[in-house]
Image (cartoon, rainbow, N blue to C red):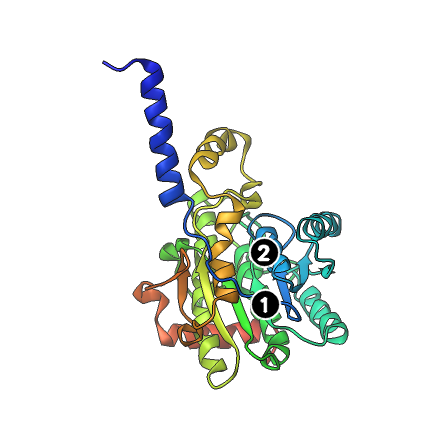
Amino acid sequence: MPGPIVVVGIGIVVYILIYYNIFKGPKCKSSATLVGKTAVITGGNTGIGKATALDLAKRGARVILACRNKQRAEAAVFDIRKESSNHQVLFMQLDLGSLQSVRSFAETFLQTEPRLDILINNAGVGGHGQTADGFELHFGVNHLGHFLLTALLLERLKQAEAGRVVTVSSMAYHYGRVDFSTLGTPVSHDSSAWVKTLGYCHSKLCNILFTRELANKLEGSTVSCYSVHPGFVYTEVFRDMKTWQKLFFTPFARLFFRAPEGGAQTSIHCAVQEGIEVLSGRYFADCSVQEVGAHARDDGVTRKLWEVSERLAGLV
C-alpha cells in the first residue's frame, strides 16, 4: 500500500494535469500585432477585462479602459503601462448602469479619439438591484448599457479596416429566457436567490441574441462581432457574496476556476484572430466556435429584442 505522502503526491499530479488540460483552457495562438489600432474595453480595470487589456497593450494597441471607478481604473492603467511598456493605455469614465453615462462616454470618445478598431463589451455584474434608469441590474448593465454603447460607436467602428465587437456572455445563458412582458423589470428584494440568479442568466442570453442580430445589421460592412464564454473564472464578480458563501466558494474557485488570464483568452482570440470574419455573430468558447441552444437561435426573439432594446435605450 502506498504511503500517505505518495497518495498526496499522486493527487497533486492528477489535479495539475486536469487543471492545465481542462480547467485552464487553451491559449489564443494568434501573434497579430495591433500597432496603430485602438481598443475600448469596458470593465478593463480588473479580472478578465484587465487581462484582456494587458494582452492588447502588449500587442501595441492604444487601449482605453472604460470603467466606473476612477481610482481603481487609474491603478490598472499604471499596472498595464508598466507591464506592457505601452503608454497608450488610458482611462475614460463609464457607468453602464446609467444610459446618460454611456451617452457621455460615447460623446467624449468620438470627440477625442479618431479611430476605433476593437470594442470589447466585457464588464458585467452579478449582484441584485436596479440601475440608475430603473432597470433590473443584470439586464441594465450586462445587456442594455452595452447595447447602447455599441450602437453609439458603430459608425466609428465601420471606418476601421476590420472592426471587431466582442461581447462577453456565459454558458449561464442556457438557463436564460427572454420574457418581453417583464424584460428589465427589477425583481423584489424578497425574491429567492435562484430568481435573482436567473436575472444574470437572462442577461447573458441577451448578449448572445444581441450579437446574432448585430451580425445581421453589419452584413456587408467591415465589422464582425462575436459573443464569448470565458470559462469558469474566479473574478470580482463574486465580491457581493455573503461571508458564509465565500467561506465555501473561495477555496473551491481557487482550485478549479480559471485565473483571469485564462478567462481572457477567448475574448482575445475573437479580437485578434485572422480569418474568423465568416463566423460573425457566432458564440465562442475555448477559442473555438460553439453551437448554442435553440432558444439562443430564435430569429424572431432576436429581432424583437433588438427593437425593444432600441426603445428602452432611447434610440428610437
- Considering only order in the chain, which callout, 1 or 2, is on the residue closer to the N terminus? 2
Read off the residue under disc 1.
119
Callout 2: SS: helix
Closer to the camera, 119 or 14?
14
Verify CB contact (< 8 Å) between mark 2 and mark 1: no
| Crowdedness near tag 2: few (<14), some (14–19) or many (≥20) residues, C-alpha within 10 Å | some
Q: Position of residue 286 (x, y in %)?
A: 40, 55
Eyeballing the image, is 316 above or below 184?
below
Q: Residue at (62%, 82%) from the top-left corner?
A: 159
Asked whether, in this view, residue 92 is left or right of residue 29, the answer is: right
Eyeballing the image, is 124 above or below 8?
below
Q: Quadrant of residue 278?
A: bottom left
| Crowdedness near tag 1: few (<14), some (14–19) or many (≥20) residues, C-alpha within 10 Å | many
Closer to the camera, 95 or 119?
119
- Quarter in which the C terminus is drawn: bottom right
Callout 1: SS: strand
Three-letter amino acid code of the residue under disc 1: Leu
Q: Quadrant of residue 131?
A: bottom right
- Quarter in which the N terminus is drawn: top left
Eyeballing the image, is 255 above or below 34?
above
User: Residue 55: which numbered mark, if any?
Assistant: 2
